[in-house]
Image: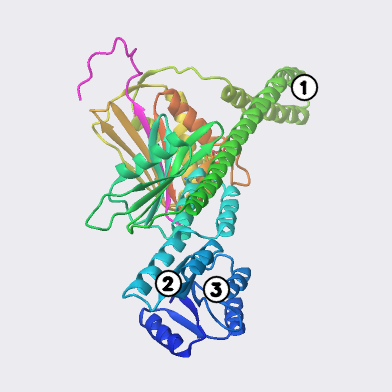
Amino acid sequence: MKQKVLVMDDDPAILEVLEMRLSAMGFDVTATSDPRTALEAVEATRFDLALLDLRMEPMDGMRVMEALHERQPRLPVLIMTAHGTIQTAVEAVRRGAFDYLTKPFVRDELRSKIARTLATRRWARDRERLLTVGQALASSGVVARVLDAVAQATVEATDADRCVVFQLEQGRLVPMASAGSPPPSWEKLAAAATAAMDKGVPITASGPLEGAEGGTIVAAPLVVQRGPAGALVIETAARIEPVEDDLEILALFSSQAAIAIRNTHDLERLKSGAVAALGRMATQVAHEVKNPLAGLRLYVHHLEQRLAKTGDAEARELAGKIANTVDHLASVVAEITAFGRPLELHREATALHPLLDECLELARARRPTDGVEIVRAYDPACPAAQLDERELRKAFLNLVLNALEALEGAGRLTVATAYSPTAGTVTVTIEDTGPGMTEETLSRAFDLFFTTKPDGTGLGMSIARSVINLHAGELTVSSRLGYGTRVEARLPLEPAADPARAPDAHA
Ligand SMILES: Nc1ncnc2c1ncn2[C@@H]1O[C@H](COP(=O)(O)OP(=O)(O)OP(=O)(O)O)[C@@H](O)[C@H]1O
Ligand SMILES: [Mg+2]
């Protein structure tokens, strides 16, 4: 889109020349000598620049500028003046003009001053727009998403070539999100980020002088609670001197980003706190229910025996049903209380492949698999390992069940193992071609009691992760909406040795 320039001069000859030259420079020009037409034009559309003659009848350039600024406060104005009236031109700048041009125009002066004005204006963007963006950010969820949005919005708002959001993690600056073209040097951006964090205020750093055109880097610290949590860094190829105003805007924007980060942290803390409290409550309730259930079981047993003696077969059958239901309840309660208590592993030499086969069998008995292609890609080199078979059965069964539930009877389920002798680990992959997870589901899949299923309890993933973690392993999930889900469990083959006594590791 062409940039719009408004030109006003009461000398028709000059007006005509200016219109021609500005059009030749690629601008969309509105030229007039009538102040009313000018004001109406500014009311109707947003201009990028105005060139106003200082001496005009009936309204001089200064008054026109003020009237324009009432309608478009940040419109950059260049005042044109003849040689003798520099003093007035300086006064115009004091009253809000961006710069002035002396008439007759010196060669290239018109072009260079316009270019400078527009370049500077790029940095001085609407505060309102940034505020709106910031508020929108503060209301959204996942941190990574928030930071991506921050980077993207910053690039759009500043016209910078790129924006990188750095976050401080364990004393190291990590680029968390970026937008725009990839930076030629991450180090320089990181250095600017560090400087901004040290100073606590936005800073400007000039890029390398590649030829005459050096770039500009501006960094603003992200201050969360007690200190800087990172920095927002933008870089532009052009040599543009950002003015105080621009740094202020960036500071404003980064503070919005920081608020967004803090809100997300707070929300996550709150969420995990609530989840933990809910978990405690569930185990307490289960605990309370456990003893009465045991009593109930005993009474039913007595009842069954007595009914057997009296020969009332029908009543005995009913008592048997009650006993079964009580048993089922007791096993649910046992599972919940077991989940609340930190587990102890009983490791023994375990062959993974038969264990996985068994989980597949158990799962197939519970879920329809007729239309499901089951692929087993076992690594024959995979040795037996010191693992807790019972706990792992629970973990893998839950993962296979999730995959089958996602497939809903059609698609492919792959169970694979891969042995890494150097790392001393084996990785079990359970992959399905189901519908995949939304970002929201993915971020909450491990939350206790989080479920998207009408009769799910939301325990499967939490159980699987805690079992794998107890084995000092790692459970990761990747999922693409519409393509499927892959869950990977990386397990060390041996329990971690006491690091002080560990033999020298070979690379
Ligand atoms: N393979 C998968 N494909 C798609 N979504 C999945 C998959 N595995 C897990 N999920 C999502 O994660 C959620 C949590 O899974 P989790 O196993 O913890 O609970 P659940 O399956 O809902 O209930 P249950 O306690 O009976 O296992 C599921 O409700 C589902 O939305
Ligand atoms: Mg499940």
As measured in the structure, the alpha-carbon distance from the residue carrying label 2 to the one carrying label 3 is 23 Å
Extreme-top residue of the structure: 501
Pair 3/1: label in front? 3
What are the residue bounds of the magenta stretch?
Answer: 482-507
Type of secondary structure dominating the magenta stretch: loop
Extreme-left residue of the structure: 506
Q: Where does the C terminus fall, quadrant-wise?
A: top left
**Which residue is under mark 2?**
101
For marks 2 and 3 on the same chain, the one whose residue lies earlier in the sequence: 3
Vertical comparison of 195 with 66: above or below: above
Q: Amino acid at mark 2?
A: Leu
Mark 1: which secondary structure?
A: helix
| Within-10-Å neighbours for mark 3: few <14, some 14–19, many 20+ | some
For marks 1 and 2 on the same chain, the one whose residue lies earlier in the sequence: 2
**Which residue is under mark 3?**
46
**Which residue is under mark 1?**
307
